Amino acid sequence: MASYRVEITRSGAKDLRRIDPKWIPKIVAAIESLESDPRPVGCKKLVGSDHTYRLRIGDYRVVYEIQDDILVILVVRIRHRGDVYR
């Protein structure tokens, strides 16, 4: 199986800078692991989109899109669970 490339949107990078520093290494490790397994155990497909998934890391959620045709994972949002879906 080919490896995916992970890209973070400008808004995703901005979200990452706002997160509590103790969570950043865990979130970055989870995002990097998406390169080898874009649909890990525990990820959920979001309703209303064919390519958007959510990954839970503690109280934070990473929302990302999988583009299988070009092997790219686009991280859209990284926020606290209470704010991510607004």
Image (cartoon, rainbow, N blue to C red):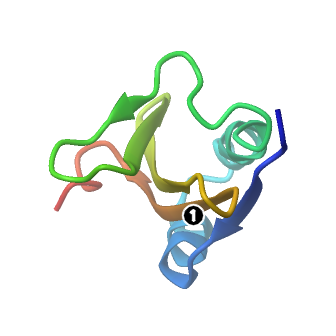
Q: Is residue 84 above or below residue 23?
A: below
Crowding near the residue tagged with mark 1, few <14, some 14–19, many ≥20 C-alpha atoms within 10 Å:
some
- Furthest-bottom residue in this view: 10
Q: Quadrant of the N terminus?
A: top right
Relative horizontal placement of residue 27, taking residue 14 as reference (left or right): right
The residue wearing badge 1 is 74
Q: Residue furthest top?
A: 41
**Near-viewer residue (56 or 68):** 68
Q: Left or right of 16: which side holds 86?
A: left
> How many marks can you see?
1
Tag 1, which secondary structure? strand
Quadrant of the image occupied by residue 73 = bottom right
- Residue positioned 84% across, 42% down in the render: 2
Outermost residue toward the right?
2
Q: Where does the image place residue 78, in percent across and percent down from the top left?
A: 47, 57
Q: Is residue 3 above or below residue 6?
A: above
Residue 5, given in percent of the width and then of the height, sits at: 78, 58
Rendered image quadrant of residue 13: bottom right
Near-viewer residue (73 or 15)? 73
Relative to residue 20, is residue 43 depicted above or below? above
Does residue 79 appear left or right of residue 7 in this picture?
A: left
Q: Amino acid at mark 1?
A: Leu
- Where in the figure is residue 18, as x and y percent of width and height? 53, 68
Q: Position of residue 4 (x, y in %)?
A: 76, 50
- As drawn, is 22 to the left or to the right of 81? right
Residue sitting at x 49%, y 28%: 58
Tell me the quarter of the image containing the C terminus: bottom left
**Quarter of the rendering containing residue 47:** top left
The residue that appears at 47% across and 36% down in the rendered structure is 55
